[in-house]
Amino acid sequence: MDKIAYIQTDSNTVHLVKLLLEKLNEFDEKVCALSNPVHKLQLFTEKETADILKISKRAVFSLRKDGKIHYRDLEIGIRYSMEDIMEFEDSCRKREIVK
């Protein structure tokens, strides 16, 4: 039979543990993404970009029109690189930290 130990903690410790668990979850998601690598130069359609960012295609369109995400206007249509997508995600994280 396993023994259960209880540790008395203050609110700061609880906050730090929650933050650590969130960071571990983010790390786990990134590791999962690494197991399915994408070539850095691969270009994505707006639909594919929306799927990667977990937003609507219309939201990607709005981000592009507002100049919030970089893109390439090719003869075959608008395309986004993984670098463009990651740069946009980083800018979102930086805005969250400032808040």
Image (spheres, helix red, strand yellow):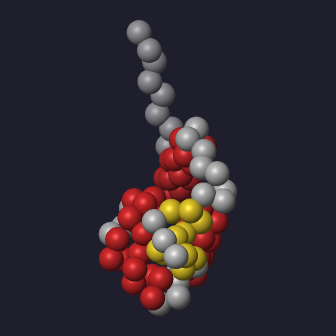
Quarter that holds the N terminus? top left
Q: Quadrant of residue 61?
A: bottom left
* Count of all numbered marks drawn on residues in the image: 0
Q: Is residue 36 left or right of residue 41?
A: left
**Which residue shows up at 39% across the image and 84% down it?**
62
Residue 59 versus residue 53 in the image, above or below: below
Q: Position of residue 70 (x, y in %)?
A: 58, 79
**Which residue shows up at 41% across the image and 75% down it?**
60
Viewer-nearest residue: 50 or 92: 50
Q: Residue furthest top?
A: 1
Viewer-nearest residue: 20 or 79: 79
Viewer-nearest residue: 39 or 78: 78
**Which residue shows up at 53% across the image and 51% down it?**
26
**Which residue shows up at 53% across the image and 56% down it?**
19
Q: Is residue 58 left or right of residue 14?
A: left
Q: Residue furthest right?
A: 40
Q: Position of residue 46 (x, y in %)?
A: 42, 69
Q: Residue furthest front?
A: 75
Residue 37 versus residue 95 in the image, above or below: above
Q: Is residue 77 something that shows in the picture?
A: yes
Q: Is residue 96 left or right of residue 61?
A: right
Q: Residue furthest bottom?
A: 66
Q: Is residue 92 something that shows in the picture?
A: no
Q: Position of residue 95 (x, y in %)?
A: 55, 80
